[in-house]
Image: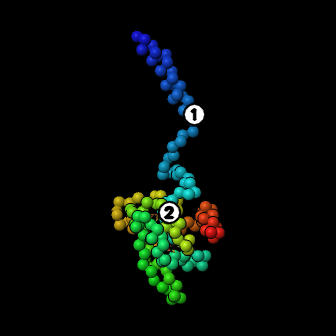
Amino acid sequence: MFDFVKTVLIALPKGFYTTFKHLFKKPVTLQYPKEKMPMAPRYRGLHYLEKYEDGSERCVCCGLCASACPADAIYMEPAENEKGERYSEVYEINLLRCIYCGFCEEACPEEAIFLGHEYEFSNDSRDAFIYTKGQMLANRPTKEKPFKKIIRKVRRIF
Ligand code: SF4
Ligand code: SF4
């Protein structure tokens, strides 16, 4: 009998009060995929390859990113253009191996590779996770994020 009274007089009002309190609060959940969470500036998502202003590729296929990669996820084949400049004819990242550590970005002396904010790249085919150079160049953000500009400036100082 005492337990019943305790439930009705204390536990129930307490529960209703908690529910009522949250009725007018702003929900913390988002209606994904219609709404998307803004990513932190340092978020490391899908990679992209950068170009110079004249449209030429920054990557010179030096292999430093592949050496720095702890997951052995980067594969490249070098070639030379008609001016004798070196570039990567093949440049691939195995996204199933990649752990998104960002070491490739840090190792690159040409500021050619960056990890962007893209995170929607699920697929049901393993082959689709071999991310090619063409895809990485196409994935370049149209407007460079201010955070990436800061990275460039800091690298030029040191
Ligand atoms: S983010 Fe890390 S694991 Fe992924 S390709 Fe770059 S260095 Fe390798
Ligand atoms: S992305 Fe950078 S580090 Fe990797 S091969 Fe190209 S120039 Fe070298």
Helix, strand or loop under label 1: loop
Tell me what residue is drawn at x 48 percent, y 60 percent: 101
Instruction: Look at mark 1 in the image and give the residue it sits on.
Output: 24
Looking at the image, can residue 138 be seen?
A: no
Task: Answer yes or no: disc 1 within 8 Å of ligand 1.
Answer: no
Taking 106 as reference, is 76 left or right?
Answer: left
Q: Nearer the viewer, residue 126 or 148?
A: 148
Taking 153 as reference, is 63 left or right?
Answer: left
Q: Nearer the viewer, residue 88 or 157?
A: 157
Q: Amino acid at mark 2?
A: Gly
Tell me what residue is drawn at x 55 percent, y 54 percent: 39
Give the total number of marks visible in the rendering.
2
- Sequence-first tag of 1 and 2: 1
Image quadrant in which the C terminus is located: bottom right
Instruction: Look at mark 2 in the image and give the residue it sits on.
Output: 102
Q: Give the answer, above or below, for where 14 lies relative to 157.
A: above
Q: Give the answer, above or below, for where 90 lies relative to 19.
A: below
Foreground disc of the pair 1, 2: 2
Q: Give the image location of residue 117, x and y in percent.
A: 52, 59
Q: Amino acid at mark 1?
A: Phe
Q: Nearer the viewer, residue 83 or 126?
A: 83
Q: Classify 10 Å Cα crowding around label 1: few (below 14), some (14-19), many (20 and above).
A: few
Tell me what residue is drawn at x 51 percent, y 43 percent: 29
Looking at the image, can residue 21 be seen?
A: yes
Tell me what residue is drawn at x 41 percent, y 64 percent: 71
Helix, strand or loop under label 2: loop
Q: Give the image location of residue 147, x and y in percent.
A: 61, 61
Task: Answer yes or no: disc 2 within 8 Å of ligand 1.
Answer: yes
Q: Classify 10 Å Cα crowding around label 2: few (below 14), some (14-19), many (20 and above).
A: some
Q: Disc 1 versus disc 2: distance between alpha carbons? A: 41 Å
Q: Give the image location of residue 121, x and y in percent.
A: 43, 60
